[in-house]
Image: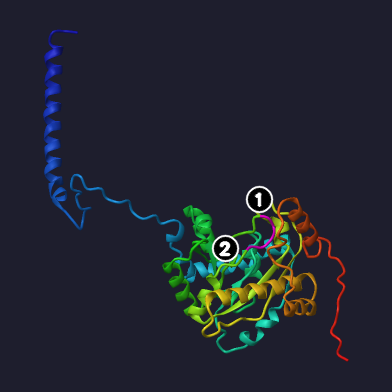
Amino acid sequence: MSKRTVPYSLTGLRRAARLGDLAGSTLQRALRPARNVGFPYRKPSIPKGVVVPPDPSKLGANFDTAWARKGPARAARKVITRGPLRLIVLGITRPEIYGADRLEDLRVRDEPPPLIFVPTHHSHLDTPLSIVAIPEPWRSKLVVAAAADYFFDAHWKGVIAALSLNAIPIDREVTSRKTSDQLKRLIEDGWSLVIYPEGGRSPDGWGQEFKGGAAYLSSRTGAAVVPMFIDGSGAIFGKGMKRPKPGKTKVLFGSPMPPVEGESTRRFNARIEAAVTTLGDEALTDFWTSRRRRATGTNPKLTGPDYNGWRRQWALAEHRKLGKAGVRRRQKRRWPDLG
């Protein structure tokens, strides 16, 4: 390196530094108006020592599903339910549907009223199966109450559930005032509702005690409750199963049950559970036998026998043999003596 090279290099560095300083000061002057702009164009400053609570979560019970009930989403859901969803349900569950004629008096009205459908819940297949089985005009304007902690714990799951099933998040343990008000508004706007009175899927294949959400909503809105019993879905894709095993199912509708003035939620809920229990007996026997047992209070309980362990599972296997989940046994029918 020559002696003349060093001074020239230092001179170039000094010039570059001056140019950098000049560009920095020019940029600061240009950004000074934006830096001085305050609230509401920028977030307010936070004083020292103040702890700001985090923004509320938009998942779970706070997941927004209003968009799923607007025109584009409804059109897309109509294609889904009448296309792939229906084909999957028919291919896996092969349902037989009974009792839809019990809704005929309401269907033929000029303006059929919204209804609250309360099916038993043993499988994730129960929701698409109910959507396929519920007749028009209620199927086209149907909302499904889904567990907020399961279907809406991630954004992508919530979007799929809301778009394909028109699901809305609810707390399966306690129905909050916010959720009940939302459901009330939807029913008053003409939307029908599918809500599982057991709260969640059966853990062992037997039914569970009913919760009072459907009875409460019916009393608040005046919408009638339609009991439903689904036989066979638990054996096809019950809780804990990794993949479905195709089989047969049976879906039974009961007569609509309007709320009775002055009846408490607890009594109405017990009446709903008794009606679904009767449908469960009808699914395994026949109409006359189930009604005769109901008159004497001897319908088999949905919750199964009182004992636990292997005896309960054994009884479940024997019980399933009577229905569509297993080999259908010939029933010994008894008909009334008409004289």
Q: Is residue 320 above or below residue 32?
A: below
Identify the residue at horizontal 54%, vertical 62% (top origin).
Answer: 146
Q: Is residue 121 above or below residue 154?
A: below
What residue is at 87 percent from the left and 73 percent from the top? 332
How would you rate the neighbour count of disc 2 (Cα within 10 Å): few for under 14, some for 14-19, many for 20 or more? Answer: many
| Cα distance in 3D space between marks 1 and 2 | 17 Å
Does residue 280 appear left or right of residue 161 in this picture?
right
By secondary structure, the bulk of the magenta-drawn segment is best described as: loop
- Crowding at dot 1, Cα within 10 Å, few <14 / some 14-19 / many 20+, comes out as few
From what the image shows, is residue 301 above or below residue 148? below
Q: Secondary structure at mark 1?
A: loop
Residue 64: % across, % down: 43, 62
**Magenta span:** 204-208
Q: Which mark is residue 199?
A: 2
Look at discs 1 and 2 and give the one toward the viewer. Answer: 2
Mark sitting on residue 240: 1
Q: Position of residue 245 (x, y in %)?
A: 74, 54
- Disc 2 marks a residue whose amino acid type is Gly
